[in-house]
Image (cartoon, rainbow, N blue to C red):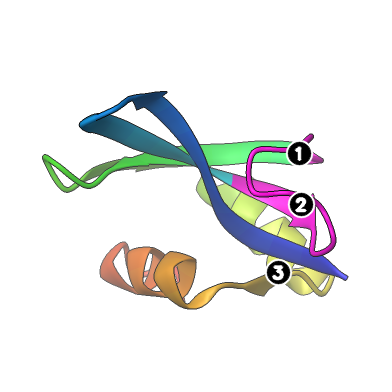
Amino acid sequence: MVKLRLKRYGRKGQVTYRIVAMNNLSRRDGKAIEELGFYNPRTNESSLNIANIKRRIEQGAQPTNTVRYILAKANIL
């Protein structure tokens, strides 16, 4: 099953996340199928590829709770 989830980047104390489509059995920082945007929790900034996110959801990808919250704030869900 494909999930939309966060992939961690950055150094200790200055973390950022990329929103990616991944197989649910992959590790958190493993190989992603597609990168769909990023999220910076320190500044609460996000950049999303809305068209690709909607396409992935239509194909059956399930967002995790955190990604669902980010998408809801951006009025995608």
- Which residue is disc 3 drawn over? 57
Residue 12 sits inside the magenta stretch: no
In primary-sequence order, the first of circles 1 and 2 is 2
- Which residue is disc 1 drawn over? 32
Q: Residue at x 16, y 48 (%)?
A: 44
In primary-sequence order, the first of circles 2 and 3 is 2
Q: SS of the residue at dot 1?
A: loop
**10 sits to left or right of 68:** left
Q: CA distance from mark 1 to mark 2?
A: 5 Å
Q: Nearer the viewer, mark 2 or mark 3?
A: 2
Q: Nearer the viewer, mark 3 or mark 1?
A: 1
**In the rendered structure, which amino acid carries the disc numbered 3?**
Ile
Q: Quadrant of residue 15?
A: top left
Q: Are marks 3 and 1 in contact (CB under 8 Å)?
A: no
Residue 67: percent from left, percent from top: 46, 65
Q: Which residues are magenta?
A: 20-33
**In the rendered structure, which amino acid carries the disc numbered 2?**
Met
Task: Identify the mark at residue 22; answer none if there is no mark.
Answer: 2
Q: 5 above or below 28?
A: below
Q: Main secondary structure of the magenta part?
A: loop
Residue 28 sits inside the magenta stretch: yes
Residue 17: percent from left, percent from top: 42, 40
**5 sits to left or right of 17:** right
Q: Are marks 1 and 2 in contact (CB under 8 Å)?
A: yes
Residue 65: percent from left, percent from top: 47, 78
Q: 3 above or below 16?
A: below
Q: Nearer the viewer, residue 17 or 38?
A: 17
Q: Residue at x 82, y 75 (%)?
A: 60
Residue 39: percent from left, percent from top: 34, 43
Q: Quadrant of residue 58?
A: bottom right
